[in-house]
Amino acid sequence: MIGLIRGLAIVALTATAIAVGTTPSEDDTTVGSPSSTEPETAPVERAPLRLAGHIDQAVFAAAERGADVTIAFLDRHDGHYESFGDAVPFPTASLAKLFIADDLFYREENTELGLTAREHRLVARMLESSDDFATTELWNKYGTSDIVHDVAVRYQLAATAVPYDGRWWNTTTTGRDLVDYYSAMLTGRGGLDAPHRDELMGYLHNFTPIAADGYDQSFGIPAGLPGATDIAVKQGWMCCSGGRWLHLSTGVIGPDDRYILVVVSREDLNYGDAEPDYPDTSLTTAVGDISAAHARETLTDVVRILFPQF
């Protein structure tokens, strides 16, 4: 992996859609191409990323490993959207932290509240290293479930619901709602002003490979696109949801945050011949859990299959 920019160029060179103005003539020259004695100054046209038939391959590969997946992908430049299972609801786990940050920043923007410097640092820890203690402090102080309700209304997220038990990680949403959230947040349609959008996205660009509790949060998009520098992600994980591991990898890819990608897996616990442990991530970090490691690799494989050019 040389990087996302080179990967996009490779796609461009292999995609037939970019051959505008370069149709070969009968004498095997390229119509409209510069003379061999002239330097080429025109930029290389890049074909947009497309998932094409790779979604079916990723879904099948995940099923072979005991997982059901959600995939949702949007090209913000032309509105092209592809998905699988994007209407299936699931707990947000740490994706609720996006909603908490957004709500606090929106209320600060509108002078409803004034966040202290320390509280801005809590938001940074909450988003960069998925710090649960920082999250719970802000959640309890600034409205608990009302935070989710306000964001869902402001962003018109019809499938996003407050947690049934008041715990932020049990907020529910869908792949389509998460894509719609990112899209509206990035354009300001959700009401967040540019300085707060830049602050929020800055934290996502600065995500740490290891979470505050020691959990490996480089799965999915980061590990599936190794070496890429133009990604920003918010990860999530939880056990057990319906007796299964839940992992979420979401964020933006490419220059100018062009592409939004949401991938989610719900995987059966897999301990091989070992005795099942059934970790409760509300009580334990599950850092060394072998079933969690298997589930993380499943989601990373999904991203690799979706983007074989990288």
Image (cartoon, helix red, strand yellow):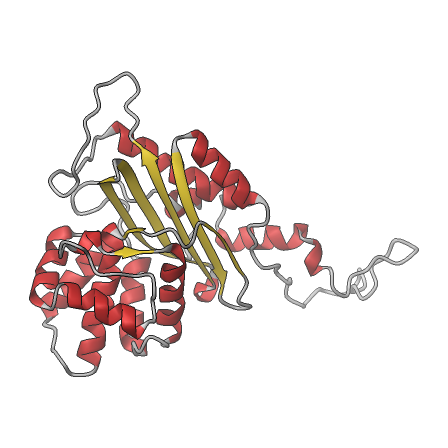
267 over 171 or under it: above or below: above
Q: Is residue 161 left or right of residue 44?
A: left
Residue at (49%, 53%) from the top-left corner?
83
Q: Is residue 193 visible?
A: yes
User: Residue 21, located in which quarter of the rendered image?
Assistant: bottom right
Along the viewing direction, whichever of 188 and 173 lies nearer the viewer: 173
126 over 268 or under it: above or below: below
Where does the image place residue 9, in percent across and percent down from the top left? 59, 54
Along the viewing direction, whichever of 103 and 266 lies nearer the viewer: 266
Where does the image place residue 165, in percent across and percent down from the top left? 14, 54
Residue at (18%, 41%) from the top-left corner?
214
Where does the image place residue 188, in percent across and percent down from the top left? 36, 76
Residue at (26%, 28%) from the top-left corner?
290
Q: Is residue 130 left or right of residue 228?
A: left
Instruction: Residue at the far bottom: name it.
Output: 111
Residue at (34%, 42%) from the top-left corner?
219
Q: Is residue 227 visible?
A: no
Q: Is residue 105 left or right of residue 176?
A: left
Where does the image place residue 244, in percent across and percent down from the top left? 28, 36
